[in-house]
């Protein structure tokens, strides 16, 4: 089961220059083959499908913990897209002056037609994410190798999107995900090392450029976020710590295993966009719920 919190892993700055085309590029990191939808669903299904978990519990716990973190990653990428799209059309409720006209020149018109100027589970070309991106062979070594490859591919894509998009909203998200994705690369490499004795961490970094090169990633590394593995659970998945231990293969600092999740931050409140009727419902009386709460003796 999942326990949900109305918290986001990082604080995202508002964009200095909102841009639908920046948002379209970032979509690749959400719903592309190597995006966060893929990491989330790969590890989620591999954890559901894991056979023989009592004998191989540390591997099961590791994949399950990382699956928990990936939910927060789809959230962070989605909010980055939402912020990059906020304020890109003309606000107002009169349809006659074509307030959404900018959408005709945007690379992803679905942001303006199929959503309230917000994220959708699709890639940078507007192709919807598909379950065909899930690899869950049931063979542990094969699944771990796939996960190591998936995280390296995801890392390559993040680096390229970083080189395309310079807005601080996108780059803060990218810095964070480069660092946390880096943790998952190391985790799967260490899992393969425990399983086979092959020194997989010697392949790193793939691509051959350290996260140090990205100032926004460096900031999170200064806070030691590249060293920490969280269980994203109240008390379960603790045997993942039998794999996540020792030192970081790149800077030699001691790895840290944490029961639970980071504290997180309140997610940004997205402004209303009346030209899309998002969210609409202008007639609702805000006093209605205040009255109900008072009658029920509830306080918010
Ligand atoms: Mn991720």
Image (tube, helix red, strand yellow):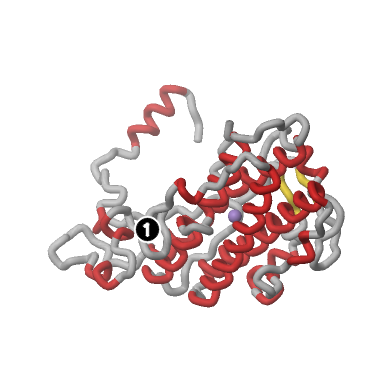
The percent coordinates of residue 137 (x first, y second) are: 59, 42
The percent coordinates of residue 242 (x first, y second) are: 82, 43
Q: Secondary structure at mark 1?
A: loop
Residue 163, above or below 115: below
Query: In the displayed structure, does residue 192 sit left or right of residue 5?
Result: right
The percent coordinates of residue 107 (x first, y second) are: 33, 69
Quadrant in which the N terminus is drawn: top right
Q: Residue at 58% of width from left, 41% of height from top?
A: 44
Q: Is mark 1 within 8 Å of ligand 1?
A: no
Name the residue that disc number 1 marks.
127
Q: Quadrant of ligand 1?
A: bottom right
Q: Residue at 58% of width from left, 62% of height from top?
A: 154
* In front of the other: 26 or 169: 26
* In front of the other: 262 or 196: 196
Q: Is residue 60 visible in this depiction of the protein?
A: yes
Query: In the displayed structure, does residue 201 sit left or right of residue 121?
Result: right
* In front of the other: 81 or 288: 81
Q: Is residue 74 visible in this depiction of the protein?
A: no
Packing grade of label 1 (10 A; few <14, some 14-19, many >=20) is: some
Q: Residue at 28% of width from left, 39% of height from top?
A: 284
View extreme (top): residue:
296
Q: Residue at 30% of width from left, 59% of height from top?
A: 110
The percent coordinates of residue 168 (x first, y second) are: 53, 71
Looking at the rendered structure, the number of numbered marks drawn on it comes to: 1
Residue 48, above or below 101: above
């Amino acid at each position: 089961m999942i326990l949900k919190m109305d918290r986001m892993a990082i604080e995202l700055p508002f964009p200095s220059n909102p841009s639908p085309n920046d948002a379209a590029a970032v979509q690749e990191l959400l719903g592309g083959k190597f995006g966060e939808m893929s990491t989330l669903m790969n590890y989620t299904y591999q954890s559901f499908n894991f056979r023989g978990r009592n004998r191989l519990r540390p591997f099961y716990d590791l994949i399950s913990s990382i699956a928990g973190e990936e939910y927060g990653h789809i959230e962070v990428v989605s909010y980055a897209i939402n912020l990059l799209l906020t304020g890109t059309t003309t606000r107002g409720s009169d349809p006659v002056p074509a307030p959404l006209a900018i959408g005709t020149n945007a690379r992803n018109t679905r942001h303006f037609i199929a959503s309230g100027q917000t994220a959708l589970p699709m890639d940078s070309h507007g192709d919807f994410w598909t379950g065909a991106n899930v690899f869950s062979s049931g063979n542990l070594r094969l699944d771990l190798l796939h996960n190591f490859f998936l995280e390296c591919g995801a890392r390559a894509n993040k680096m390229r999107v970083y080189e395309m998009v310079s807005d601080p909203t996108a780059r803060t998200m990218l810095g964070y995900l480069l660092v946390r994705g880096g943790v998952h690369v190391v985790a799967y490499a260490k899992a393969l090392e425990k399983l086979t004795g092959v020194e997989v961490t010697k392949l790193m970094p793939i691509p051959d450029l350290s996260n140090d090169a990205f100032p926004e990633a460096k900031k999170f590394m200064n806070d030691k976020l590249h060293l920490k593995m969280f269980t994203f659970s109240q008390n379960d998945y603790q045997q993942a710590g039998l794999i996540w231990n020792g030192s970081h293969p790149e800077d030699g600092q001691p790895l840290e295993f944490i029961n639970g999740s980071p504290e997180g931050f309140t997610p940004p409140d997205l402004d209303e966009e009346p030209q899309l009727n998002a969210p609409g419902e202008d007639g609702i009386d805000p006093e209605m719920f205040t009255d109900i709460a008072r009658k029920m003796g509830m306080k918010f």
